[in-house]
Amino acid sequence: MNVLVINAGSSSLKYQLIDMSTESVLSTGLIERIGEQGTTHTYKTNCVELTKEEAIENHMQAIESLMAKLADEEVGVVDGMNDIDAVGHRVAHGGCDFTESALIDHKALKAIRDNIELAPLHNPANITGIESCMAVMPKTAMVAVFDTAFHQTMPRHAYLYGLPYEAYADHKIRRFGFHGTSHKFIAKRTAEILGKDIKTLKIISCHLGNGASIAAIQYGESVDTSMGFTPLEGLVMGTRCGDIDPAIPEYLSKKLNLSDNEMNDYLNKQSGVLGLSGKSNDFRDLRHYVAKGDERAKIAIEVYCYRIKKYIGAYTAAMDGFDAISFSAGIGENDAMVRKYIIQGMDYLGLRLDEVKNLSGIKEGIISTPGSKVAALVIKTNEELMIARETAEVLEKH
Ligand code: ADP
């Protein structure tokens, strides 16, 4: 079975075609600046890598363009549309309507649309991607895979805020959590590497990319996660502030004379390690500045790591201990010093880091000592593969 994975943004579209018999990637692509000047289409297979400027006015033309590449006589990997068995769409927000991935029919599409108000930047682009795909490939089955669905198992005491209950009942104000596809993948892979049944494990999953979140996964189910009603809550991120006193925005917007939109921008795009360091949101840059003695870059990394440590403490309490902690995504997979800083001093939990392994440039595997009661791992997350797996699973059920 060949599954096409689509991640549609407002002006970009990422895709991957995966052969599920071997879980191998046949091709990947990225179309950027859709509907703008200088639209580019980058297409890669094992044999070629091309980037071309193309006139692509909208998402439908983007899907047509990617189909033309996939079935191209010279650089293509399939004979035609019939060789694509299903399309898996990444969808940001499933609200309370979706606890798992779903076959896209009129009802599902309506529910995704109903959740636009919860993800005004992302769901409309995802819907455009789905509708464009449906128009170009009307006979192909489509599945929606939600960033929020995995966290729908959170208990009430974890997803409710301390606000009047009506805020939840009337306005859906609750914690949803995001990065669900990645956390599910990380937990599964952690169990595989440890050679244990996921249903026996308590796992803390750290997805540390530009956006970052941490999840408590007990016996295969998410019981808490750091992102909330929006992806702004929780950890300090590349440019997002994470948890702050909710009184700060009003206070600061008066001081700085900022509109609601400007305040939103301040918290989402100018904060996090970028705001703290005043230099960059990228840990590779921050490491460079730290090496040159930059104090604010150093502070940014310290605040970043400390917040993660606090959440680990909270989730240890939430799950009455844990068996494994996994680090994933750009920072979690690559920055050994961040992992070290977070884990150090956790001997009291039975967690001992193998310093040599941690610094070995390991891409995936165990980084705790053989005698450590709690295992620490690096996991290479793969959201596209998880979306393709979910898509194949949904189709098998139907
Ligand atoms: P996203 O998908 O949210 O953009 P990624 O998981 O790709 O995030 O992570 C991107 C971030 O990972 C970069 O901003 C950078 O901070 C960090 N990163 C990537 N490579 C390295 C590296 N070799 N060392 C340290 N940090 C890295």
Image (cartoon, rainbow, N blue to C red):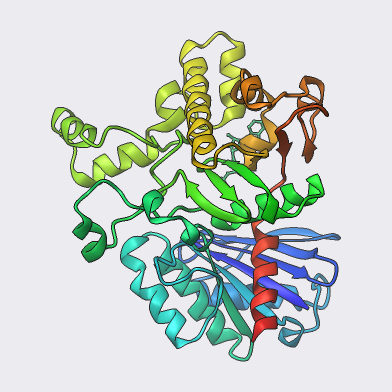
Left/right of residue 170 with respect to residue 349 in the rendered view: left
Q: Residue at x 42, y 48 (%)?
A: 231
Q: Residue furthest bottom?
A: 139
Q: Quadrant of residue 365?
A: top right
User: Where's residue 182, x and y in %?
Assistant: 61, 53
User: Where's residue 388, x and y in %?
Assistant: 68, 68
Q: Residue at x 73, y 24 (%)?
A: 353
Q: Is residue 145 above or below residue 154?
A: below
| On-image quarter of the N terminus | bottom right
| On-image quarter of the C terminus | bottom right
Q: Is residue 25 above or below residue 338?
A: below
Q: Is residue 258 above or below residue 395?
A: above
User: Where's residue 264, x and y in %?
Assistant: 29, 44
Q: Residue furthest top?
A: 293
| Ligand 1 sits in quadrant | top right
Q: Residue furthest front?
A: 320
Residue 230 seen in the current view: no
Residue 331 seen in the current view: yes
Q: Residue at x 39, y 39 (%)?
A: 269
Q: Nearer the viewer, residue 347 or 356?
A: 347
Q: Nearer the viewer, residue 6 or 186?
A: 186
- Marks counted in the figure total 0
Left/right of residue 47 with respect to residue 349 in the rendered view: right
Q: Nearer the viewer, residue 139 or 45?
A: 139
User: Where's residue 340, x and y in %?
Assistant: 66, 22
Q: Is residue 145 above or below residue 228?
A: below
Left/right of residue 182 with respect to residue 155 in the rendered view: right
